[in-house]
Amino acid sequence: MWTVFALALALAQARPDGSTSGSRADQLAHIETLVKAASPAAIARLTGLLGHPLHDVRFAALRGLGSLGAPEAVAPALQWLSSSDLLPRVAALAALAEPACPFPPQAAVATLAQLADARPELRLPALALLRDRNVEVPSPMLALLGEDENAAVRAAALASVGQRQDPAARHALVNGLGDVDVAVRWEALAAMGRSRDPALRPVLEHVVETGDATWAAAAVQALGPWAIEPPRRAWRRWRKAQALPPK
């Protein structure tokens, strides 16, 4: 999340706003001092800086309010999440991602809405924020994101499956296991283990049988206590139940 937020600051600094770099640096240093002070007066001052003419000063002020757990961070964050501009939305997600920042239901709804955006700069931090806040993304949305053109988004979607056991989640995980990107395949394997979905056990056992040593070992680890009966017998049972053609 810090990386995305730093990108937002860098892009904001590149915009012409008629200010000097010194004034920007002074304001950002002042924000750091206010966050360290963590007093009601500091929170009031940070709130006032949300109207500052410099983009990066506004972003840092909101992040500071979030890090202090100030309720004053929520309303502007929700407003920024509805902006047509990318940068305020990235900054809002970064502020809401601060562990101390309040995260009411309307913040969860606004964050879920970011997943429909075409830009991975929004989808990635939104997925991370929802996962950290234990907000369940609907399985059909995860399945859709699991086919995203961006490999990092696909991996993040699979990491968000959690312990759900439904057809859409299974579809996303099985597809991920055949992804062209190795990081996505690894995440799919790990996510299958975390899901503990009995319907996925034969798939993991098949990886044990057919994968190379590294993949087989990872599949055994994902299987955990399931790795008891001979994998080949379970795989044949699953293949028959799914009416798949023989190998």
Image: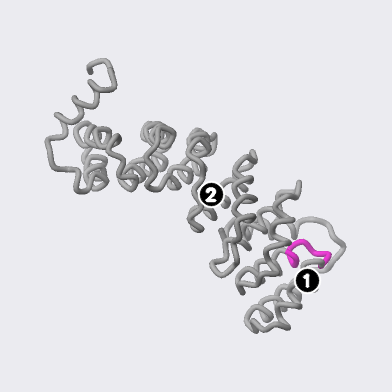
Sequence-wise, the earlier of marks 1 and 2 is 1
Q: Quadrant of the N terminus?
A: bottom right
Q: Secondary structure at mark 2?
A: helix
Q: On the picture, is 93 further left or further right than 194?
A: right
The residue positioned 76% from the left and 46% from the top of the image is 84
Q: Which residues are magenta?
A: 52-58
Q: Nearer the viewer, residue 17 or 103?
A: 103
Q: Quadrant of the C terminus?
A: top left
Q: Amino acid at mark 1?
A: Leu
Q: On the picture, is 218 further left or further right than 32?
A: left
Q: Nearer the viewer, residue 44 or 32?
A: 44
The residue positioned 66% from the left and 77% from the top of the image is 32
Q: From the top left corner, tell me how far across and down residue 78 is, in percent.
A: 70, 56
Looking at the image, residue 62 lies above or below residue 161: below
Q: Secondary structure at mark 1?
A: helix
Verify whether residue 169 appears in magenta. no
Q: On the picture, is 94 further left or further right than 52?
A: left
Q: From the top left corner, tell me how far across and down residue 47 is, in percent.
A: 75, 72
Looking at the image, residue 209 lies above or below residue 50: above
Q: Quickly name the residue at label 1.
A: 49
